Image (cartoon, rainbow, N blue to C red):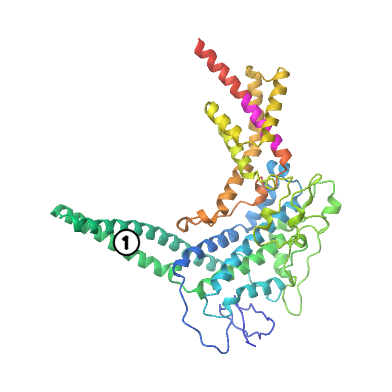
Amino acid sequence: MVAATMSYFPGLSMTTTGTTAISSGGFHFFRFRADSKPQPMILGILAFDAAKTISRLVALYRSLTDAEFNRHRKEIIQSEGVAYLNSRDERLLLNLACAEQLEDLEGAVDAISRLCARCSNRSLSRFDLVYADLKQGLIDIGKLDYGSRKVNRIVEKIEKYLSTTASLYSALESLTQMETSERKLKQWKKNFKENPLQKTNFDLFESKIAFQRKQVRSLKDVSLWNQTFDKVVSLMAKLVCVVYARICILYGPYISKLPNAVKRKQQQNNIRIHPETFAPIMHRDESRHSMWNSGPITSTSKKSGLSKFYSRELNVNMLLLPDKASLLAGLMPGNSCVSEESSGGNLWRNNVLLHSAARTTVGGAGLAMRYANVIMMAEQFLQGPGSMGEGARGQVYEMLPAQLREKVRAKLRGLRSGGRGGGGGREMAEGWREAVERMMGWLGPVAEDTLRWQAERNTEKQRPGSLDTKGRVLLIQTLHFADVEKTEAAIVEVLVGLSCIYRYEDTRSCYYESD
């Protein structure tokens, strides 16, 4: 059996089955007694894939600040659109937010594990086991202080690598275009005789391409391209541990199934500095007593100083409310926001949370993107009634599912039969405009966040030359878990209101033309 030690930070130690812990104050993973180290390999072209994973990690890290967490609690979760369409139950929404962030972290761990296979340090090549030990409580994460000077230096170093790698990608794109032009010039020289003026232009181009190649070589040296797998994986693994501990610290007071990953003294300081963050959330629903019995925070072992994690991976039922028959039964009256078929799966793999929405939700019905586009087009029509031509209206109409088209037609027929849908009255048009503007005030941001969420998660279209490390939109901010009946009712009201506004504007324009 191989004896090894792992230390991400000074004083951080672990003991795994079949291994012997050796104290160390440096930044390294495992140190083997025997086995000669092979020559470390550099990332090379894989630097761009690594950069995408790192940008996801940094974005996740940035989204876990106290200010960002409080913003989610006080602004996003309590916003009118999220509260009406998704749920007013703050604890359930925090469960969903935590589940999504843990799923994002697990995706980063999977990407790191693929890079680990090329590490020369054998201990680094099994980071998946290290991460499993982290979740089992075999690693003391008490020193993984989020926002500490040491952690901030790591993040700054990583962001510098991201910046230079993005510059390298852009420089390589430019070099590729210049080399294509160079080949064409060489072919042209073979077929045609150059004059002195053309020779001057050719020399200038050759100097430019030589400078570009020099710049690419320089950027390779300072970017992820020429960094070893061992170094990059080590930095990414440290950040993974910090992010995991931070998630447990933030959501632990609200989710009893999460382990207590913070020592008592540090916890008391956090409560003193941020009392609202660690105070129980006041439940507004009628089922407050049965829904809000959050389990006690487990105390840290006095003997070992380790935070005890569960010995198996948390699945959906473990992380979310244990008193629910299905994953999120009761999220909306009489409905479950997440389907029972997926409630027993592993929470963090294969976008389980994304595919677990019940059929009574917009996401479960597969209509989130379509409805988001309809709402955004309706917002454009509201801001500029002149853009509501027959072609644009027909385009929106074609985007609607058959059942929603029928609802819109029925609503318009009802208005016309009641003598309220002529659209010729100024007061009625203004009344509809005010009503639609109020609805779009909370419906529009949810639709916009739905489109933004999709764009942020579309890693295939994400260019390494434009990596974003800002905080990302969460699913709870989108239409994904929105009640489909409430969403469709709101869309119908908006479209009917726009139709009445259009009729009034059309009638008024015809009147002025006749004059």
Q: Residue at x 76, y 77 (%)?
A: 302
Q: Residue at x 60, y 36 (%)?
A: 399
Q: Which residue is mark 1?
A: 212
The answer to whether residue 240 is left or right of residue 253 is left
The answer to whether residue 317 is left or right of residue 1 is right
Number of marks: 1
- Residue range in magenta is 488-499
Quadrant of the rendered image containing residue 372: top right
- Is 122 contained in the magenta span? no
**What SS does tag 1 mark?**
helix
Q: Position of residue 398 (x, y in %)?
A: 60, 34
Q: Residue furthest bottom?
A: 34
Quadrant of the rendered image containing residue 405: top right
Q: Front-most of 43 and 89?
A: 43
Is residue 359 shown to the viewer in this render?
A: yes
Q: Position of residue 336 (x, y in %)?
A: 77, 49
Quadrant of the rendered image containing residue 355: bottom right
Vertical placement of 74 versus 17: above or below? above
Vertical placement of 462 versus 127: above or below? above
Q: Residue at x 71, y 35 (%)?
A: 489
Is residue 141 shown to the viewer in this render?
A: no
Q: Position of residue 88 (x, y in %)?
A: 75, 46
Q: Residue at x 61, y 44 (%)?
A: 369
Q: Residue furthest left?
A: 196
Amino acid, disc 1: Gln
Q: Front-most of 470 and 498?
A: 498
- Is 493 contained in the magenta span? yes
Vertical placement of 493 versus 223: above or below? above
Q: Position of residue 337 (x, y in %)?
A: 74, 49
